[in-house]
Image (cartoon, rainbow, N blue to C red):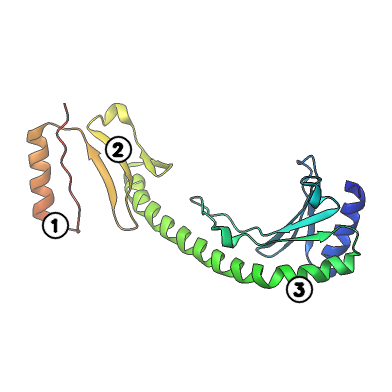
């Protein structure tokens, strides 16, 4: 079955399932997706291996994290193969019966995990933004992009966790002593302090 014929068939499958049909033109082989809300089903057609000829592969797809890569486990990949010779009604029924039940369970679980991860990173970057906004700096790739020429004593300001930031200074011992005395005297927040002597 050529790409145009398969496209027409998958459009009917999408209509039966009540999903939006999206063709992926950037691939040399046939790739489309059926999308509804945060659910996206990937459908591909391959000629290799020979056992997959004249079959479509229905695969799981999951939302992406806004801040980092979410690593899927092998058991998170839901995939079935269906003969492309089947009618749109038969293909839709196979997807509903064989694919959607395990996929929707995984989708709900992984979506919650990604939302939890993104909320954690939002809080981490909020901590950085408080400092950046105070001094007119910007946060770039988990670090504060400051004016290095005018602040050579600062080595790095980066995210640490959702309540703390990590700041590295390159300063004279006398200034370090004064800084630490003020820091330990105020004790405005719990902190971790590492001092490294570098040549």
Residue depth check, mark 1 versus mark 2: number of the one nearer the observer: 2
Q: Residue at x 33, y 44 (%)?
A: 158
Which residue corresponds to mark 3? 97
Which residue corresponds to mark 1? 187
- Mark pair 3, 2: CA separation: 54 Å
Contact check, label 3 and label 2, Cβ < 8 Å: no
Pointer 2 local density, CA inside 10 Å: few below 14, some 14–19, many at least 20: some
- Mark pair 1, 2: CA separation: 22 Å
Query: Based on the displayed image, in which of its 4 quarters is residue 123 positioned?
Result: bottom left
- Mark pair 1, 3: CA separation: 60 Å
Q: Residue at x 39, y 52 (%)?
A: 125
Pointer 3 local density, CA inside 10 Å: few below 14, some 14–19, many at least 20: few
Query: Based on the displayed image, in which of its 4 quarters is residue 15 positioned?
Result: bottom right
Q: Residue furthest front?
A: 51
* Residue 111, percent from left and from top: 56, 64
Pointer 1 local density, CA inside 10 Å: few below 14, some 14–19, many at least 20: few
Q: Horizontal placement of 160 versus 69: left or right?
A: left
* Residue 193, percent from left and from top: 17, 48
Q: Earlier in the sequence, mark 3 or mark 2?
A: 3
Residue depth check, mark 1 versus mark 3: number of the one nearer the observer: 3
Element at label 1? loop
Contact check, label 1 and label 2, Cβ < 8 Å: no
Which residue corresponds to mark 2? 156
Q: Residue at x 51, y 61 (%)?
A: 114
40 is higher (above) or lower (below) than 183: below
Residue depth check, mark 3 versus mark 2: number of the one nearer the observer: 3
């Amino acid at each position: 079955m050529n790409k145009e014929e398969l496209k027409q068939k998958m459009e009917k499958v999408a209509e039966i399932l009540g999903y939006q049909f999206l063709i992926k033109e950037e691939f040399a082989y046939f790739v489309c997706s059926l999308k509804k809300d945060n659910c996206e089903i990937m459908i591909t057609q391959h000629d290799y291996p020979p056992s997959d000829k004249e079959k479509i592969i229905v695969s799981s797809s999951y939302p992406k994290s806004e801040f980092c890569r979410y690593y899927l486990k092998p058991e998170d990949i839901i995939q079935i193969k269906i003969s492309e010779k089947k009618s749109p009604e038969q293909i839709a029924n196979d997807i509903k019966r064989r694919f959607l039940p395990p996929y929707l369970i995984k989708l709900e679980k992984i979506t919650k995990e990604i939302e939890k991860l993104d909320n954690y990173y939002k809080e981490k970057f909020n901590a950085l933004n408080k400092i950046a906004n105070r001094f007119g700096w910007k946060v770039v790739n988990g670090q504060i992009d400051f004016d290095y020429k005018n602040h050579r004593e600062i080595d790095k300001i980066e995210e640490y966790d959702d309540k703390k930031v990590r700041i590295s200074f390159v300063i004279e011992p006398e200034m370090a002593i004064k800084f630490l005395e003020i820091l330990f005297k105020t004790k405005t927040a719990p902190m971790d302090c590492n001092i490294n002597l570098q040549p």
